[in-house]
Image (cartoon, rainbow, N blue to C red):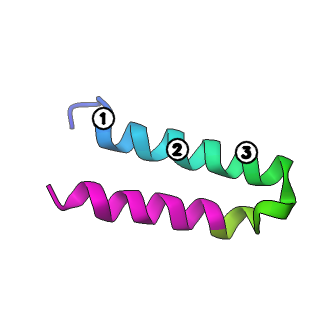
Amino acid sequence: MNGQIDQRMLVLMLVGCGTVHVTFEHPSFGTTLVVGVAVVTLLHFLMRGR
Protein backbone atom coordinates (compact mmCIF):
# COMPACT_ATOMS: atom_id res chain seq x y z
CA MET A 1 0.00 0.00 0.00
CA ASN A 2 3.05 2.28 0.28
CA GLY A 3 1.61 4.18 3.25
CA GLN A 4 -1.44 5.40 1.35
CA ILE A 5 -5.01 4.53 2.20
CA ASP A 6 -7.13 2.67 -0.31
CA GLN A 7 -10.32 4.47 -1.49
CA ARG A 8 -12.41 1.46 -0.55
CA MET A 9 -11.02 1.51 3.00
CA LEU A 10 -11.69 5.25 3.27
CA VAL A 11 -15.33 4.78 2.23
CA LEU A 12 -15.75 1.90 4.68
CA MET A 13 -14.30 3.92 7.55
CA LEU A 14 -16.36 7.05 6.79
CA VAL A 15 -19.64 5.19 6.41
CA GLY A 16 -18.94 3.11 9.52
CA CYS A 17 -18.10 6.16 11.60
CA GLY A 18 -21.12 8.05 10.32
CA THR A 19 -23.43 5.15 11.04
CA VAL A 20 -22.08 4.66 14.54
CA HIS A 21 -22.40 8.39 15.24
CA VAL A 22 -26.04 8.50 14.10
CA THR A 23 -27.01 5.44 16.13
CA PHE A 24 -25.13 6.79 19.16
CA GLU A 25 -27.02 10.08 18.99
CA HIS A 26 -30.37 8.36 18.37
CA PRO A 27 -30.38 5.03 20.25
CA SER A 28 -33.84 4.18 18.94
CA PHE A 29 -32.20 3.27 15.60
CA GLY A 30 -30.54 0.25 17.16
CA THR A 31 -27.51 -0.86 19.07
CA THR A 32 -24.55 1.28 18.04
CA LEU A 33 -21.88 -1.36 17.74
CA VAL A 34 -24.04 -3.94 15.97
CA VAL A 35 -25.36 -1.47 13.40
CA GLY A 36 -21.90 -0.05 12.68
CA VAL A 37 -20.32 -3.45 12.21
CA ALA A 38 -23.21 -4.68 10.06
CA VAL A 39 -23.01 -1.69 7.70
CA VAL A 40 -19.24 -1.89 7.32
CA THR A 41 -19.38 -5.65 6.74
CA LEU A 42 -22.10 -5.30 4.13
CA LEU A 43 -20.20 -2.58 2.28
CA HIS A 44 -17.02 -4.65 2.43
CA PHE A 45 -18.74 -7.62 0.80
CA LEU A 46 -20.42 -5.44 -1.84
CA MET A 47 -17.19 -3.66 -2.80
CA ARG A 48 -15.11 -6.82 -2.78
CA GLY A 49 -17.24 -8.34 -5.53
CA ARG A 50 -16.08 -6.07 -8.32
Q: Which residue is mark 1?
A: 7
Q: Is residue 39 magenta?
A: yes
25 or 10, nearer to the observer: 25
Where residue 2 sits: x, y (%)? 21, 31
Query: As drawn, which residue projects farthest toward the left?
Result: 50
Q: Which residue is mark 3?
A: 21
Q: What's the magenta region?
A: 35-50
Dot 1 amino acid type: Gln
- Which one is earlier in the sequence, the residue at label 1 or at label 3? 1
Dot 3 amino acid type: His
Q: Quadrant of residue 21?
A: top right
* Residue positioned 61% across, 59% down in the render: 36
CB contact under 8 Å: marks 1 and 2: no
- Which one is earlier in the sequence, the residue at label 1 or at label 2? 1
* Residue positioned 21% across, 38% down in the render: 1
**In the rendered image, which quarter contains the C terminus?**
bottom left
Q: Is residue 8 magenta?
A: no
Helix, strand or loop at mark 1: helix
Where residue 23 sits: x, y (%)? 75, 54
41 or 5, nearer to the observer: 41
Dot 2 amino acid type: Val
Helix, strand or loop at mark 2: helix
User: Does 31 sit left or right of 44 as displayed?
Assistant: right
- Which one is earlier in the sequence, the residue at label 2 or at label 3? 2
- Could you give the CA–CA distance between mark 2 and mark 3, rounded to whole angstroms? 10 Å
24 or 29, nearer to the observer: 29
Sort mark 3 into few (<14), some (14-19) or many (20+) by Cα contacts within 10 Å: some
Where residue 40 sits: x, y (%)? 48, 58
Sort mark 1 into few (<14), some (14-19) or many (20+) by Cα contacts within 10 Å: few
Q: Which mark is residue 15?
A: 2
Helix, strand or loop at mark 3: helix
Query: As drawn, which residue projects farthest toward the front?
Result: 28
